[in-house]
């Protein structure tokens, strides 16, 4: 028994030592970027784990943008070189990925992540290391409200999305009585609060019911909603739970217009909902049928390279790479990496009316772009763009 | 109001059935073999995938797929017993816990590699049959979950109480050494128990999969609550697990329906903590203390 204990202790010690050695390996050394060195940048996303699918779209969006830019001569003759680091949607893993990219790989800037929680965790590192970060996907309002001046986001925030959807409902319909079903996370609560505030300000009534990520049975919440008899049910959550909510709404025979955000406009949602999403109206950051010519070129090139239609995640991150490229082209020569990062931050802050696949980008003082989302409706497994209508 | 109340009771009963189905195998393996099987959630997940394959890809009738998945998982359960549980039987308890935890992680990640992490819908011939009675809505698939749960409980009860095999299982539960002296083959009992436990997990997966979604992570998500059910009923107490599954299902439904959905999960674990403080043997613990 004693021998066993000693063995166990030794094993633990060995593990701790290995961890320390690994951590020490991440120490930095101040390299100076030579003239025609490639410009390295980090892309942090969930390439494994529950969000591996959007993670794959992120990777492909970056690969396409980089290929196009490098083929056209790079940024002032320097090639772009993306380094992908996996965070598996786990904040702690995301922070170590950020640390590695910033201090060991010495990337010029970062793009990422997928989840709001991981982005918020990484922002502490980029502020300390003074490295700019473009946020194309995570939508929690706190990201650009935290006073961190190294973060720039080319995606509509929760309140923007909620307001634009509610504007549509209030201008196009007479519905004023709503039931909100929301995920009890930063994302879901942010949307719920924004919808509630809008309804309170513009007249109408709303109740809110919550659920946890991974929940599968929504009968209790929906039974309550059925009795409330709302005009519309607004789902503030992701596709996996969202598809089960739409199915259970149908099973319980609730007659109300369904609304949703972001993920509920994806074809993956359509597949899971299997027809129960008929008539659902959702916001969308990007549609492959968008009339925007930049978007059309992107869709064509993406399909040629990867043989699939791009989704909104690929589009958003593709746009982010071009925003970074545009800013870097405006910069002069920099003496070292720290100066390069600082100059890039200042150049990004000046981004104004930069055309992109999701529409023009202008960063405000907080690094947030005002983005117009689209509003689409599901019909027979296809999407119809309701807004903008031209 | 009354109608809403009855609907919430029905919702709670269906939810309770889903917990019962998963808890049965878990508590049985613990009761008879003394193994806390962390990989039980993954057996449930594999059962759902097996059922999905048989029913959707091979287009077999749902009931055939259910039985098929139970047989496939019974074989998996026997492999698990032979390869992991049996070699670890004499080792300290901690080794067994780490062993089953390892199997759980291994199986979930293997499933992610094989089936991708994306959830799948599992349509059956009963999914789109909507029933409505006096304003109470339910689908055929949900009704099926409830009824098959009742049938499985009855079968299990018969097996344990009235058959030779059941008697041998109970003997092992009470005193393995004495059972061995009486000529009971412990290895065989252990093998059969694991097979039945895994088959029950498969039944749960195939029945619950169609009303929700099927994904490699489904076992992990379900198992926390099922452990609450098993502890509430008294570890290893099959009857207690059934009662506590229905109590929790109803408590959750009624809390969400008449107070707030924010408290739905809080109530489960509040009951659990209260029981652990005041009745650590579980709500139904006394009924089965048979150790002599």
Image (cartoon, coloured by chain):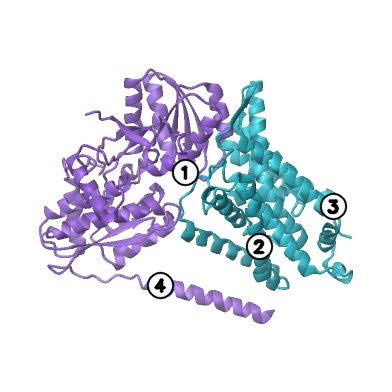
Chain colours: A purple, B cyan
For the residues carrying marks 2 and 1, which lies nearer the camera in this image?
2
Mark 1 crowdedness (10 Å alpha carbons): few <14, some 14-19, many ≥20: many
Circle number at residue B161 = 3
The lab-note entry on whether marks 1 and 3 share a chain reads: no
- Tell me the chain of label 1: A
Q: CA distance from mark 3 to mark 4?
A: 57 Å
Residue at left 71%, top 61%?
Answer: B194
The lab-note entry on whether marks 2 and 4 share a chain reads: no
Residue B108 vertical position relative to residue A14 in the rendered view, above or below: above
Tell me where residue B255 appears, x and y as whole percent.
62, 33
In the picture of the structure, the residue carrying the numbered disc 4 is A22
Quadrant assignment, res A196 = top left
Quadrant assignment, res B270 = top right
Residue A28 vertical position relative to residue B209 in the rendered view, above or below: below
Residue nearest the viewer, comparing B125 with A344 = B125
Secondary-structure class at tag 2: helix
Quadrant assignment, res A56 = bottom left
- Tell me the chain of label 2: B
In the picture of the structure, the residue carrying the numbered disc 1 is A240
Secondary-structure class at tag 1: helix
- Tell me the chain of label 3: B
Q: Is residue A3 visible?
A: yes
In the picture of the structure, the residue carrying the numbered disc 2 is B75
Q: Is residue B54 left or right of residue B190?
A: left
> Nearer the N terminus, badge 3 or badge 2?
2
Q: Is residue A37 left or right of residue B275?
A: left
Tell me where residue B105 appears, x and y as whole percent.
55, 62
> Nearer the N terminus, badge 4 or badge 1?
4
Mark 3 crowdedness (10 Å alpha carbons): few <14, some 14-19, many ≥20: some
Q: CA distance from mark 2 to mark 1?
A: 31 Å
Tell me where residue A226 appears, x and y as whole percent.
54, 25
Mark 4 crowdedness (10 Å alpha carbons): few <14, some 14-19, many ≥20: few
């Amino acid at each position: 028994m004693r021998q066993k204990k000693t063995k166990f202790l030794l094993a633990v010690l060995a593990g701790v030592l290995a961890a320390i050695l690994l951590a020490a390996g991440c120490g930095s050394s101040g390299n100076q970027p030579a003239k025609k060195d490639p410009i390295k940048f980090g892309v942090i996303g969930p390439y494994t784990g529950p969000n591996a699918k959007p993670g794959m779209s992120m990777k492909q969006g970056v690969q396409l943008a980089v290929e196009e830019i490098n083929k056209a001569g790079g940024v002032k003759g320097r090639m772009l070189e993306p380094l992908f680091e996996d965070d598996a949607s786990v904040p702690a893993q995301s922070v170590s990925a950020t640390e590695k990219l910033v201090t060991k790989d010495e990337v010029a800037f970062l793009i990422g992540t997928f989840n709001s929680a991981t982005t918020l965790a990484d922002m502490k590192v980029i502020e300390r290391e003074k490295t700019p970060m473009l946020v194309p996907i995570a939508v929690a309002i706190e990201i650009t409200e935290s006073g961190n001046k190294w973060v720039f986001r080319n995606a509509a925030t929760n309140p923007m999305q909620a307001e634009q959807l509610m504007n549509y409902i209030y201008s196009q319909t007479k519905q004023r009585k709503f039931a909100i079903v929301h995920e009890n996370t930063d994302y879901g609560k942010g949307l719920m609060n924004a919808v509630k505030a809008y309804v309170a300000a513009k007249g109408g009534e709303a109740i809110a019911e919550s659920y946890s990520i991974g929940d599968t049975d929504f009968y209790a919440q929906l039974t309550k909603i059925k009795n409330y008899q709302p005009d519309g049910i607004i789902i503030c959550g992701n596709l996996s739970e969202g598809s089960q909510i739409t199915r259970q709404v149908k099973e319980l025979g609730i007659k109300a217009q369904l609304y949703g955000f972001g993920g509920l406009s994806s074809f993956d949602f359509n597949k899971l909902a299997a027809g129960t999403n008929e008539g659902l109206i959702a916001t969308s950051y990007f549609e492959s049928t968008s009339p925007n010519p930049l978007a059309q070129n992107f869709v064509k090139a993406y399909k040629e390279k990867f043989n699939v239609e791009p989704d909104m995640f690929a589009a958003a991150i593709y746009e982010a790479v071009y925003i970074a490229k545009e800013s870097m082209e405006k910069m002069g020569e920099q003496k070292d990496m720290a100066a390069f990062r600082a100059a890039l931050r200042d150049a990004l802050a000046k981004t104004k009316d930069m055309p992109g696949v999701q529409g023009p980008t202008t960063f405000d003082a907080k690094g947030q772009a005002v983005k117009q989302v689209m509003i689409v409706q599901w019909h027979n497994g296809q999407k119809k763009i309701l807004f903008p209508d031209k | 109001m009354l109608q809403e109340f009855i609907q919430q009771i029905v919702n709670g009963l269906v939810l309770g059935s889903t917990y019962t189905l998963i808890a049965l195998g878990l508590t049985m393996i613990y009761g008879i073999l003394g193994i806390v099987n962390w990989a039980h959630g993954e057996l449930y997940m594999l059962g759902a995938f097996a059922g999905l394959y048989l029913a959707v890809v091979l287009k077999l009738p749902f009931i055939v797929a259910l039985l098929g998945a139970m047989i496939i998982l019974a074989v998996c359960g026997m492999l698990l017993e032979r390869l992991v549980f049996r070699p670890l039987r004499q080792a300290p308890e901690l080794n067994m816990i780490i062993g089953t935890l390892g199997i759980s992680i291994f199986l979930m990640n293997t499933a992610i590699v094989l089936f991708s992490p994306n959830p799948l819908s599992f349509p059956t011939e009963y999914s789109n049959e909507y029933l409505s009675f006096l304003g109470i809505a339910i689908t055929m698939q949900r009704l099926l979950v409830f009824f098959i749960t009742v049938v499985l409980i009855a079968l299990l009860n018969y097996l344990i109480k009235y058959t030779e095999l059941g008697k041998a299982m109970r003997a092992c539960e009470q005193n393995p050494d004495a059972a061995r002296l009486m000529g009971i083959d412990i290895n065989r009992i252990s093998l059969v128990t694991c097979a039945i436990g895994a088959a029950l997990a498969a039944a749960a997966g195939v029945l619950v999969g169609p009303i929700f979604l099927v994904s490699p992570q489904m076992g992990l998500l379900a198992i926390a609550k099922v452990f609450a059910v098993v502890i509430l009923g008294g570890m290893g107490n099959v009857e207690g697990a059934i009662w506590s599954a229905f109590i929790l299902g109803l408590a959750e439904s009624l809390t969400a329906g008449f107070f707030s959905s924010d408290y739905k999960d809080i109530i489960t674990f509040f009951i659990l903590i209260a029981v652990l403080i005041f009745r650590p043997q579980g709500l139904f613990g006394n009924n089965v203390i048979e150790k002599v």
